[in-house]
Amino acid sequence: MAIKGTDIVKRLPEGGKKNCRECGLPTCFAFAMKLAAGGIAIEKCPYITPEVSRELEDSLAPPIRPVTIGRGANALLVGDETVLYRHEKTFVHQPGIAVLIADDEPAEAVEGKIKKLKELHFSWVGKTLEADLLALQCKSGDPVKFTALVNQVLSAVDCPLMLISENTDALLAAHGLCADKKPLLYPVTAQNLEKVISAVKQNPAVVAVKGAGVESLVHLTNRLKEAGIEDVLLDPGSKDLQSAVRDQTLVRRAALKQGFRALGYPTVAFPCFMTADKRRETLLASIFITRYAAVIVLSDIDEHTLLPLLVQRLNIYTDPRMPMAMEEKVYPINNPDQTSPVLITTNWALTYFIVSSEVGAQDQSLTFRALNAGALEVLPKPRLAAQRGLALGEFEGELVATVRAMSEVPVVRRRRGASTQATIPGRKVSPPARPFRLLAIGASTGGPQVLVQLCAELPPDLRVPVLIVQHMSPGFTAGFARWLAEESRLRVKLAEHGEVPLDGSVYLAPDGFHLRVDADHRLLLGDEAPVGHFRPSVDVLFRSVAENVGAKGIGLLMTGMGSDGADGLLAMRRAGGWTLAQDADSCVVNGMPAAARKLDAVDAFVTPAELPGLLVAATRPR
Ligand code: SF4
């Protein structure tokens, strides 16, 4: 257990009353408190005796010593744990997964395991999951064979190594080949302890002590500490699952709860030696991930055994106070194409809840990211639809109609930012040579993307205001306005009752209100009955423009299901306005423009690519 500042101060010079300030702090008490918190080195006080310094260092050391196996970027740091249960705070250094290679395995098996260690990597929530080290075992008892294996591995892969041999000469010979990599040597027992100590004092390594039970480890670690060797792992020598869990828990509890320094080291576990059944071995490894092992040795790895263990390890060693979270955006998974399904998930920590309840109206950015990525339509979930006053039957009808319509939309590959088509071959559109005062646009399915494209290309000094009715499920229009504003150089807002529209500004009809212009060209919002199921209705907007703007109005009817806007566009044409409709090829659904064509309401069919140039030319001062 960590020593407290109030206990440290009693051990300082003159019982903590010297207060000479040479450590840079005003009092010995301040020094003691900072030392307890790890904020200052003991050496800063020149008056502490070597004995007290050693005692304090011992008391201040972490209850489970941090140990690094290997060197460089691939080194594995284990230990330094401070809690018995993950929910108390967090587990810190995840256990290393080791793959066992014995020197009596066929060459192909050895190469296969090395290959798997190098290639089995998994991308998971922005991290790369993989096994960590190779455990090389001298099973033959032949130092020559064992060192040959070590040399083969050293030339093939750069990873931390564990060397396993009951033959101490073979163990130390192998250590001599890779001493610069600071390998983990196993087993260190009462029989080879002194031999290993003298070798490790010359060439540092991590040593794993093995005993017949937890108690037998104590004199081994005490002797190693006395010899100045503290990079130590413990193996209580457990033979079965029950004793293994008991021993791992005993060691962790003794270190953390009793502050028993002789057991204050990380542990190693060998599922590979506990069973010949691969599935049982994986289950044992899974238990050791939660029950304290710092290095877990497996006989082999495959995708189906390794991935679950790595994911479990990641979850157990993720700080429960800081759950994993992904940045909200559209992620391509496995090279999706235009026919791939769309998966939606959330950062909800407990993912077994139904995620659809999380993806709500509050998070509309996700909706518009989907539209931006090529989604054709957005619909509210039934619960949200009900909240917005839509009866379940109405919602079902809308859903079925939308899915039917979408099933007839040809699948196309979209290039972001690219216009679908330049102009319609064989015909040239020229704007009428008269001044215009207002542009009115109606759109439905497929409209958001083409409106974003149009508004992104119109200049901020456009000489007319732009009024838009976009059919959209209730609750999404405000989010659409924000998206349009982000992508557009024009000012974009939801229309307000009575306001005077300004040139270079875009006014979107809000949810549930018809949008009109009056004789003074002011905007009017009305909650009269839907027209043709729509409120806002394109026909209502276009008719008011026909009536109050006449020949100075431009009407543009874009992609969408049904026929809303066709009658209104005809009224505008009859009033002398210039009427345009989106060409059939670029429409996601050609219902509305086709309905206008049938009524002979359209002066010209235009592509999205040529629209910005035409509208700028038409509204230029003359
Ligand atoms: Fe106390 Fe040592 Fe600091 Fe002096 S240098 S104030 S004796 S802790």
Image: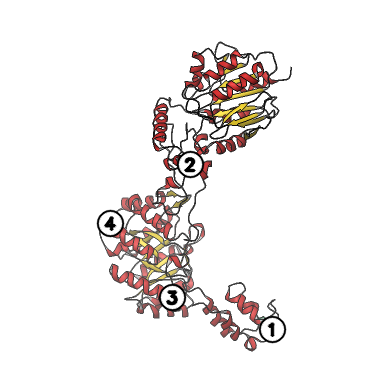
Can you tell which mark lies on residue 331?
A: 2
Q: Which mark is residue 255?
A: 3
Mark before the other along the chain sequence, 4 or 3: 3
Q: Nearer the viewer, mark 4 or mark 1?
A: 1
Residue visible at 65% across and 25% down? 518
Residue at x 33%, y 51% (from the top left corner): 302
Tag shown at residue 330: none
- Whole-angstrom CA distance, mark 4 to mark 1, is 63 Å
Does the residue tagged 1 have its C-beta within 8 Å of any atom of ligand 1? yes
* Between discs 1 and 2, the one toward the N terminus: 1
- View quadrant of ligand 1: bottom right
Please, is residue 348 above or below residue 441 in the view? below
Cβ(mark 2) to ligand 1 < 8 Å? no
Q: Residue furthest front?
A: 528
Which badge, 2 or 4, is on the more N-terminal residue?
A: 4
Q: Nearer the viewer, mark 2 or mark 4?
A: 2
Q: Nearer the viewer, residue 37 or 150?
A: 37
Q: Are marks 1 and 3 in contact (CB under 8 Å)?
A: no
The answer to which quarter of the image holds residue 263 is bottom left
Q: Amino acid at mark 2?
A: Tyr
For the residues labelled 2 and 4, the Cα–Cα distance comes to: 34 Å
Display colour scheme: secondary structure
Checking the image for residue 279, the label placed there is 4
Residue 605 seen in this snapshot: no
